[in-house]
Image: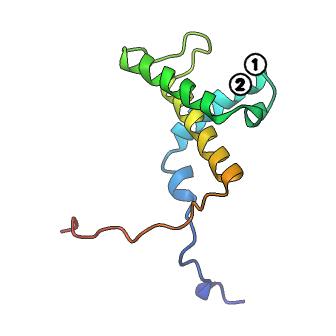
């Protein structure tokens, strides 16, 4: 098979996230590590998503009040917030079957 003609059009490019946000992903992964030790690995899947909404908002409020790190874990509030938002997103996609792949063509009028 000629790899030069491989059809990548329309496929997601995970490098944009994994390389472009490597530090942020590592920070969120540490929150998951902490949760796995405190509870059980992947036990977040068994919790109602509304609890993650409240938890994300608590971390946001703490950040708004000038706190950088969560007092209990010592990890970044923003990483905790991101983890809670990811939990909500994952549950929405898995439980409700929401399409997450289709997007409208982005505007190009801002390019010079």
Work out whether residue 66 or residue 74 is closer to the camera in this orientation and state it: 66
Q: Residue at x 37, y 20 (%)?
A: 64
Q: Residue at x 44, y 24 (%)?
A: 60
Image-quadrant location for residue 25: top right
Image-quadrant location for residue 46: top right
Work out whether residue 83 or residue 25 is closer to the camera in this orientation and state it: 83
Work out whether residue 23 or residue 78 is closer to the camera in this orientation and state it: 78
In the picture shown, does residue 112 fall above or below 88? below
Mark 2 → mark 1, Cα distance in angstroms: 5 Å
Q: Position of residue 50 (x, y in %)?
A: 60, 32
| Secondary structure of residue under mark 2 | helix
Residue closest to the far right: 40
State the quadrant of the C terminus. bottom left
State the quadrant of the N terminus. bottom right
31 horizontally vs 46: left or right: left
Residue 75, numbered circle: none
Work out whether residue 94 or residue 43 is closer to the camera in this orientation and state it: 94
Residue 35, numbered circle: 2
Residue closest to the far top: 71
67 horizontally vs 44: left or right: left
Question: Which residue position holds label 1?
Answer: 38
Q: Position of residue 5 (x, y in %)?
A: 60, 88
Q: Residue at x 81, y 27 (%)?
A: 40
In the picture shown, does residue 96 fall above or below 101? above
Determine crowd level at label 1: few under 14, some 14-19, many 20+ residues with C-alpha closer than 10 A. few
Determine crowd level at label 2: few under 14, some 14-19, many 20+ residues with C-alpha closer than 10 A. some
Q: Residue at x 67, y 89 (%)?
A: 2
Q: Position of residue 111 (x, y in %)?
A: 22, 67
Contact between marks 2 and 1 (CB within 8 A): the answer is yes
């Amino acid at each position: 098979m000629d790899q030069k003609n491989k059809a990548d059009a329309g496929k997601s490019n995970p490098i944009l996230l994994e390389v472009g946000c490597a530090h942020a992903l590592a920070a969120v992964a540490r929150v998951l590590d902490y949760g796995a030790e405190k509870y059980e690995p992947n036990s977040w899947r068994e919790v109602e998503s509304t609890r993650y909404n409240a938890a994300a908002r608590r971390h946001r409020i703490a950040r708004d009040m000038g706190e950088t790190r969560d007092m209990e874990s010592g990890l970044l509030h923003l990483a905790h917030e991101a983890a809670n938002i990811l939990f909500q997103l994952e549950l929405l996609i898995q439980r409700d079957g929401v399409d997450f792949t289709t997007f409208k063509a982005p505007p190009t009028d801002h390019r010079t």
